[in-house]
Image (tube, grey):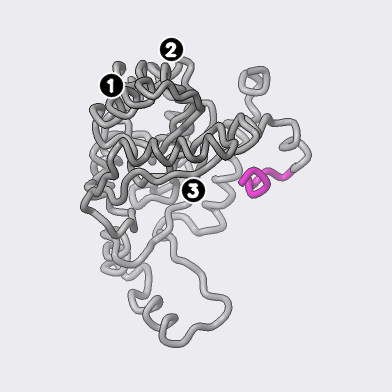
Amino acid sequence: AIDSLPFPNRGFIHHIDYHSIVGVDEKLATIISSRGCPYLCTFCDVPYKKYRQRSTESVLDEVEECLELGYGEFHFYDDLFNITPKKVIEFCDEVEKRKLKFHWDFRGRINTVTRESLVRAKRAGLRMISFGIETGTDEGLRELRKGSKTGQAHRAFKWCKELKIRTIADYMIGLPFERSADDVRANIDYLLHDLDPDYMQIAILTLYPNTEIFDQAAKKGLIDPGRWRNFCLDPKPGFTVDHWEEFLSLKELVDLQKQSYKRFYFRPSYIMK
């Protein structure tokens, strides 16, 4: 993942502490404790909207098996780990009950975070959270049907800083309401100045079939809605995914993506940190 970051000078990457991004133990295992996500984000292609959760006991039984094999760190790769603060606290209760010691991180939402759940998770070994932030305005979040607000993001990142929990902000550009390069840069400003996460990942919005935003693009005539079906019936090399190019071309978006990575990771304050 590090080598795929669109920096023009790859040599700089080798000086980033990338081991701390991926993990801090010699052996890291990936675990899924639930499937599905009940939220209705317009861009999301997760097909399972019904949330199905394993028991905390079965998840930690698996953790214990991995610990016996020498693993010391776990990445919970659920579509949504912190469905409620209660789930996180119950997980931490069981970790402490079993007297288990390990590092862990998860992918989660900022609107289901409480300070209490973060305090408990930190005490139980939580090292990092990857939050889906997506964009920097409440208007944009409403249009994406994200189900969260910028104030909630600000609060969650503030708590994580106080508790020394590392954060990754997952972000998108090339959104339908970004009509110019200045709009994209303004959204990145929010990421830089309001949230200031430990790490960030910026993706260009991809239009996948069976998503609301794909249908919106097709209705506007921006994409051919039958391309994926035709490809499935007659696969050929060179097939590419679609992006929202109503206002900015893919080349312009890639350039803005590179600029955004530079703005974030090449800041003197960030390099010193």
At label 2, counting other C-alpha atoms closer than 10 Å, the crowd grade (few under 14, some 14-19, many 20 or more) is: few
Please tell me which residue is depicted at 27% across the width and 42% down the height of the picture: 146
Left or right: 273 with respect to 219?
A: right
The residues bearing labels 2 and 3 have C-alpha atoms spaced at a distance of: 28 Å
For residue 162, the mark is 2
- Check if residue 237 falls in the magenta segment: no
Callout 1: 10 Å neighbours few (<14), some, many (20+)? some
| Residue 59, image quadrant | top left
Q: Crowdedness of circle 3 by 10 Å Cα count: few (<14), some, many (20+)? A: some
Q: What's drawn in magenta, residue-wise?
A: 1-9
Residue drawn at x 31%, y 17% is 115
Question: Residue at label 1?
Answer: 114
Q: Amino acid at mark 1?
A: Thr
First along the sequence among labels 3 and 1: 1
- The image position of residue 53, as x and y in percent, is 26, 45
Three-letter amino acid code of the residue under disc 3: Ala
| Label ID, residue 203 | 3
Q: CA distance from mark 1 to mark 2?
A: 13 Å
Numbered badge on residue 191 = none
**Quadrant in which residue 21 is drawn:** top right
